[in-house]
Image (cartoon, rainbow, N blue to C red):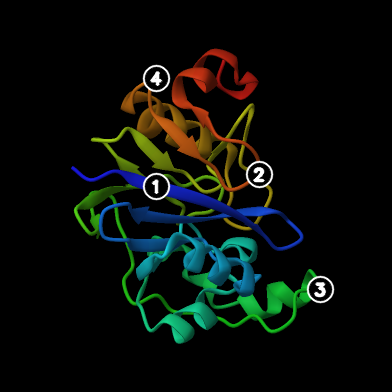
Amino acid sequence: MSKTRAAIIPVTPFQQNCTLVWNEEDGRAAVIDPGGDIAEIERAIAQANAKVERILLTHGHVDHAGAAAELRQKLGVPVEGPHRADQFLLENLAESGNAFGLSGLRNITPDRWLEEGDEVKIGDLALKVLHCPGHSPGSIVFFNPDQRFAIVGDVLFQGSIGRTDFPGGDYDTLIRSIKEKLLPLGDDVAFICGHGPTSTFGQERATNPFLR
């Protein structure tokens, strides 16, 4: 199996971790959670000499999905995810952006909604889809069992968890998603989260105060 590379591109005033994932052998790639700052994302794509085949969304909040419509138009590739339960968020991206002082953002309907058990391919890299509600109703996580990594959006952070005080959020549901869907994947699994540094499920199981 060819090696997978990832580059984190902090975007928007929220410093959201937009992530470019690509196959080192042939450059086939996906952009995950393009919240804004498209010029920065395009710069990262060029530096990696990546051939972006799709845009993936972990959930519908504006800092993760705000630039997806514009990037889809520029690159001519489909948008996949999140789960359909976040449709109400994606239909209000422009309004949400204005509320946070982010202009020019557009609402979006994905080309494909993703559900528990679905799979997304980037070349020969297969990402399994886990529906992990709680931060938002439609939050999903992308997991690669072979190379032992996950991209978790705002479900889990190093030392913390996603906020649950937004519309559709629920604390108990989020904790259940983490404990029943993510931690059983294995302590060795490294993850990129929506904000802040990376971690492993094992580190969070042992040290995250929300999971004790």
Which of label 2 and label 4 is nearer to you? Answer: 4
At label 3, counting other C-alpha atoms closer than 10 Å, the crowd grade (few under 14, some 14-19, many 20 or more) is: few
Q: Amino acid at mark 2?
A: Arg
Q: CA distance from mark 4 to mark 1?
A: 21 Å
Q: How many marks do you count on the picture?
A: 4
Q: Which mark is residue 163?
A: 2
At label 4, counting other C-alpha atoms closer than 10 Å, the crowd grade (few under 14, some 14-19, many 20 or more) is: some
Instruction: Decide which of tag 1 and tag 3 comes sooner along the chain.
Output: 1
Mark yes or no: residue 120 visible.
yes
Which of label 3 and label 2 is nearer to you? Answer: 3
- Residue 101 placement, left or right of 83: right
Mark 4: which secondary structure?
loop
Q: Amino acid at mark 4?
A: Asp
Instruction: Decide which of tag 1 and tag 2 comes sooner along the chain.
Output: 1
Q: Is the C terminus in the top left, top right, bottom left or bottom right quadrant?
A: top right
Q: Residue 185 appears at what percent x and percent y?
A: 32, 28
Q: Is the N terminus in the top left, top right, bottom left or bottom right quadrant?
A: top left
Q: Which residue is mark 1?
A: 5
Instruction: Decide which of tag 4 and tag 3 comes sooner along the chain.
Output: 3
Q: Which residue is mark 4?
A: 187
Q: Amino acid at mark 3?
A: Gly
- Please tell me which residue lies in front, 3 or 19: 3
Mark 2: which secondary structure?
loop
Q: Residue 200 appears at what percent x and percent y?
A: 48, 26
Residue at x 36% of width, y 55% of height: 22
Does the residue at mark 2 contact the one at mark 4 (Cβ under 8 Å)?
A: no
Which of label 1 and label 2 is nearer to you? Answer: 1
Instruction: Decide which of tag 3 and tag 2 comes sooner along the chain.
Output: 3
Does the residue at mark 1 contact the one at mark 3 (Cβ under 8 Å)?
A: no
Q: Which residue is mark 3?
A: 101
